Amino acid sequence: MSTNPLLNITALSQSFGGLKALDSVTMAISPGEIVSLIGPNGAGKTTLFNVLTGVYKGTSGQIRFQERPIRGLAPHQIVPLGMARTFQNIRLFTNMTALENAMVGRHTQSKNDLLWSLLRNKTFYRQETEIEIEAKKCLATVGILTSANLIARNLSYGDQRRLEIARALATKPKLLILDEPSAGMNPRESQKLMELIRHLKNQGLTILLIEHHMRLVMGISDRIIVLDHGVKIAEGTPQEVAHNTKVIEAYLGKNAAH
């Protein structure tokens, strides 16, 4: 395993007017890790994800991905570098099939340009076939290949969540960022999600997730990072974080910590 972090964040801040949503957050993620980002509502977790993926530019600080500075890049510039995400609220192309949704993700790595698409030459059709094959592999990885030809809106809620992951996987990421992937899932679906995340790690993928489902977080994380009011208050193994006084105070109040 590489000794250099895959993702390195240094003193990252994000302000909205007078509100500091992130305050000098520093963290690093090594290749092959599963790292969970937790904290009370309003802690800055999704803001951090949005800065990482180019939705927000960040006010100050540095983000290096594979040793390359990326803060300020747009989302369409970041995805081809090897970073992909899902969203807390499902954002599928609801009138397209599951396969077509996954193919959209794979197209971000395609060499087909507008001219080839207009000409529809042999190169175009060969690449489209390759994209379809890769998209089907991603659907198989998340366990929904049999639903490839179903319209996305007709999938079960859990399968829609899995399709979002498949579409992200289709971009061939080195870092997969999951924003509350178990939100709205029943216990059986959450258990299957935990198994899927472990499987992705075993395939060599690095994973960063926001998650409120503590059993899932404690069950799969190599490390946990805790934010509160935009500040990193703790970092460590699940056991270390579970017994951290600052973390207990952030979730339950000072009286509970004592």
Image (spheres, rainbow, N blue to C red):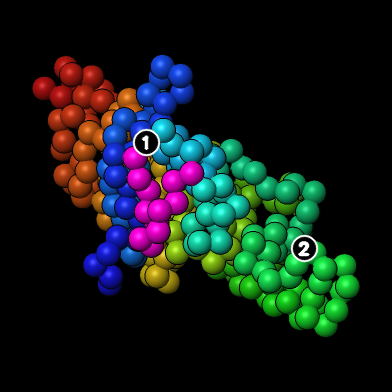
Element marked by disc 1: strand
The magenta segment = 60-72
Magenta segment includes 230: no
200 shown above or below 161? below
Between the residue at mark 2 and the residue at mark 1, the CA separation in whole angstroms equals 45 Å
Who is closer to the viewer here, 30 or 51? 51
Taking the spot 29% from the left edge, 39% from the top edge, the residue there is 11
Residue type at mark 1 is Ser
Which numbered disc, 2 or 1, marks the residue closer to the eye?
1
Magenta segment includes 69: yes
Residue type at mark 2 is Asn
Who is closer to the viewer here, 177 or 67? 67
Element marked by disc 2: loop
The percent coordinates of residue 156 (x first, y second) are 66, 48
135 shown above or below 125? above
Q: Earlier in the sequence, mark 2 or mark 1?
A: 1
Residue with the most extreme right position = 119
The residue carrying pointer 1 sits among few (fewer than 14), some (14 to 19) or many (20 or more) residues within 10 Å by Cα, namely some
Quarter of the image with the C terminus in it: top left
The percent coordinates of residue 176 (x first, y second) are 46, 56
Quarter of the image with the N terminus in it: bottom left
Toward which corner of the image does residue 227 lie, by quadrant? top left
Toward which corner of the image does residue 48 lie, by quadrant? top left
Is residue 45 shown left or right of residue 81?
A: left
The percent coordinates of residue 209 (x first, y second) are 41, 48
